[in-house]
Image (spheres, grey):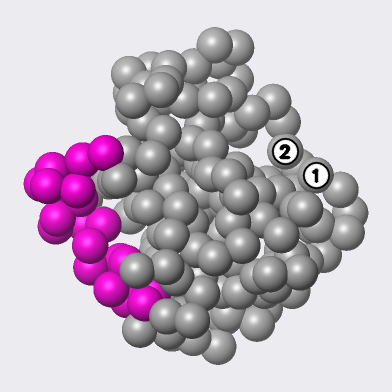
Amino acid sequence: MKTFVLGGGCFWCLDALYQKTVGVTEVVSGYTGGHTKHPDYDSVCSGMTGHAEVVAVSFEETVVPEDVILDMFFVSHDPTTLNRQGYDVGTQYRSVMYYQDAEQKAIFDDAIAKNQENWKNPIVTEVSRLPEFHVAEDWHQDYYAKHPEQGYCQVIINPKLAKARKYYSQWLAA
């Protein structure tokens, strides 16, 4: 089993995608990369903590290859916009990949190079060593499944899921 810690804007979007991915065993929404010792949603949303909204995606690589997990990451958000995903603006919404060791860093660097061909503008995804991971509040975990009718889910998450399904339908549960 492997775990990747990825940030592509609001963690609800990545959580929704990976919760539906075959071979993913766990998705945990959280915060990392900042200087505040005990971040919470309100403080991270202020943009003053330095933390990014991220998900820790654990998966069985014998079921779903790591390159599929990473390619889905690049399809599910715009990695060419610095500190912004759509209407979400600030460093807390940055595109970021947190590695746990040199092997994972190389995997992430290779994924960026591979996916650059799909983007006109340069990918600005940050690749950094994983500092302490802070689990987000319970109400953020599996948010989309609990609130599919919520406006953000309808307007922002559903189109991202539809785009991912276009390219990765064989990896996504119904």
Range shown magenta = 146-165
Given the image, on which type of amino acid does mark 1 rest? Gln
Above or below, comparing residue 41 to residue 12 in the picture:
above
Answer whether residue 65 is magenta in the image: no
Mark 2 element type: loop
The residues tagged by marks 1 and 2 sit, at their Cα atoms, a distance apart of 6 Å
Which quadrant holds residue 140? Answer: top left
- Residue 89 position in % (x across, y down): 30, 44
Given the image, on which type of amino acid does mark 2 rest? Leu
Mark 1 element type: loop
Looking at the image, the residue that sits furthest to the front is 174
- Write the residue at 61% across / 33% down: 33
Badge 1 or badge 2: first in the primary sequence: 1
Q: Which residue is labeled 2 in the image? A: 130
- Write the residue at 65% across / 70% down: 64
Q: Dot 2: few (<14), some (14–19), or many (≥20) neighbours within 10 Å? A: some
Q: Say if mark 1 contacts mark 2, CB within 8 Å.
A: yes
Q: Which mark is residue 100?
A: 1
